[in-house]
Amino acid sequence: MSRTICRNSEEIPRELLDCLERAGKVAVLTGAGVSAESGIPTFREAHTGIWARFDPMQLASPEAFEQDPATVWDWYQWRRELIARSRPNAGHYALAELQGLVTELVTITQNVDGFHALAGSSGVLELHGNIQRDVCSRTGRTIDPDWIEAHREQRPPPSPHHAEGLARPDVVWFGEALDPGTLDAAFAAAGICDVVITAGTSGAVQPAASIPVAALQAGAVMIDINPEENELSRMARWHLAGPSATWLPALVGELGRNRG
Ligand code: BV8
């Protein structure tokens, strides 16, 4: 199948819009790039300030937490404060609106900021967890935010669920398994969708990056939204080269207008 690179969000190919309008089921996989325009640095961008010297890939691991829990905890506190000062962007809101324009849309995200739900998307599959929740490092049980607040002077706070447990963010670290139910639901959505949209992802992280490939193998048409070219954009029928906060509202705006 041919591949078209689109660089002007004011000239969306008619064939692309027809494909979305005909689509019954749509699956969307988002990555850190969708939150970039909310001011949240992607894993590939250099983190700012004191975190610039750390590699996120190293910090987001059980080994780092085992070796230096305070530094890992502080990094997540810094990210949580950044997220608390930020808001979903037009791309998040457009995806929430798209849910009302197609028969069925499943939003699958690698992001842990919770912005899709905050923007109104429902049934979001959070493959890598959610940074706003804390769990016990030994039992995995959720820890109440009031407990964290009451023990905030300890970095990280102790766990109320296990004598040797510590509080850790409820995210999937490198080397940790994703929640099987969430992952199964994501692949199931990919297996039956007519269109799969990838937005803001480098396609570097597994098993998330295999989800759009599974959709392609099941016969879906792929649309990739990313300022850069990568493995995923080269597989796509359309590569919308630019920021998701521009392209997603443009797509949804056109769809909405055609719906009258
Ligand atoms: C697992 C939560 C097994 C934490 C994250 C070798 C080969 C293949 C795989 C592996 C391998 N070695 C190890 C692995 C597995 C590993 C992996 O994939 N490693 C990669 C890096 C090689 N995966 C794992 O470990 C996974 N677990 O495999 O477990 C297992 C099974 C059973 C039992 C035990 C174990 C777990 C992976 C999850 C890691 N956790 N997040 C946290 O956030 O702190 S992943 C983390 O990276 C974030 O979620 C983030 O989303 C992701 C990075 O990927 P992207 O989202 O794509 O972001 P990225 O920065 O890469 O790219 C941003 C893109 O946006 C760019 O393309 C950019 O151009 C674009 N962009 C920028 N601005 C914009 C934009 N796009 C649109 N608009 C814009 N404005």
Image: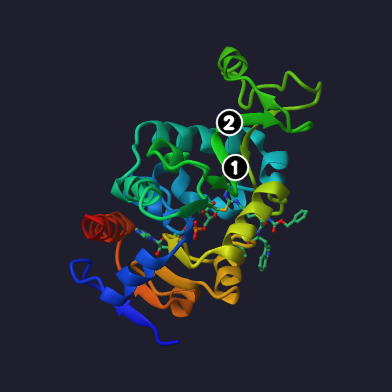
Colour scheme of the picture: rainbow
Residue depicted at 68% across the width and 50% down the height: 178
Numbered label attached to residue 81: none
Quadrant where the N terminus is found in the figure:
bottom left
Going by the picture, which residue comes out furthest to the left? 10
Residue on which the image places disc 2: 133
Toward which corner of the image does residue 247 lie, by quadrant? bottom left
Identify the element where label 2 is drawn.
strand
For label 2, being within 8 Å of ligand 1 is answered no
For label 1, being within 8 Å of ligand 1 is answered yes
Numbered label attached to residue 129: 1
Label 2 vs label 1: CA separation? 9 Å
- Under mark 2, the amino acid is Arg
Is residue 162 shown left or right of residue 80? right
The vertical placement of 159 against 198, above or below, is above
Task: Check whether the beta carbons of the residues at disc 2 and disc 1 lie within 8 A of each other.
Answer: yes
Quadrant where the C terminus is found in the figure:
bottom left
Query: Dot 2 surroundings within 10 Å: few (below 14), some, or many (20 or more)?
Result: some
The vertical placement of 126 against 149, above or below, is below
Identify the element where label 1 is drawn.
strand
Residue depicted at 33% across the width and 67% down the height: 227
Query: Dot 1 surroundings within 10 Å: few (below 14), some, or many (20 or more)?
Result: many
Q: Position of residue 132 (x, y in %)?
A: 53, 32
Toward which corner of the image does residue 237 lie, by quadrant? bottom left
The residue nearer to you, when weighing 48 against 124, is 124
